Image (spheres, rainbow, N blue to C red):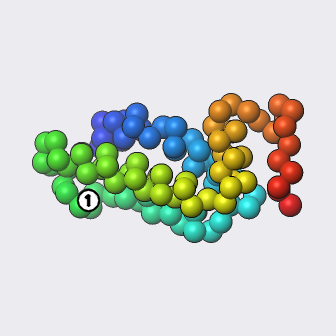
Amino acid sequence: MWKRLSVIWLAVRGDAKRLWYALGHPESPGWLKAGAAALVLYLVSPIDFIPDVLPVIGVLDDLVIVPLALRWLLARLPAHIRAYAERRAGGVRATDGWTDHTVR
């Protein structure tokens, strides 16, 4: 299982960071939190669309489904939350000189 998670992490680490920071935004929508929770449950669940006991195909479905789900969640974010997550994932913090005027 750890090998599977490390391979998936290499494929999605940038999107995962953006999702993490979007979840931390004060105006993060509830559907985003539910979608992220469902994605994590899918990753750690022993139930898959294609079982992992099949040598290549079992991990390949995770390498397709997880990045697509991440991109789908991030694409539906409001613009100001997406911009906030992009800045944070790029290494910029709120104390580094920028302010997010859209936070109410």
Classify residue 48 by image quadrant: bottom left
Classify residue 94 by image quadrant: top right
The picture places residue 65, in percent across and down from the top left corner, at: 34, 54
The picture places residue 21, in percent across and down from the top left corner, at: 65, 46
Which residue is more in the foreground, 34 or 90?
90
Classify residue 86 by image quadrant: top right
The picture places residue 64, in percent across and down from the top left corner, at: 31, 49
Instruction: Report whether 90 appears left or right of 68.
Output: right
- Residue 2 visible (yes or no): no
Residue annotated with mark 1: 48
Residue under the image location 39 percent in, 37 percent down? 11
Say if 53 sits above or below 42 in the image: above
Q: Amino acid at mark 1?
A: Asp
Which residue is more in the foreground, 36 or 86?
86
| Mark 1 neighbour class, 10 Å CA radius: few under 14, some 14 to 19, many 20 or more | some
Say if 89 sits above or below 22 in the image: above
Residue under the image location 19 percent in, 49 percent down? 58
| Quarter of the image that includes the C terminus | bottom right
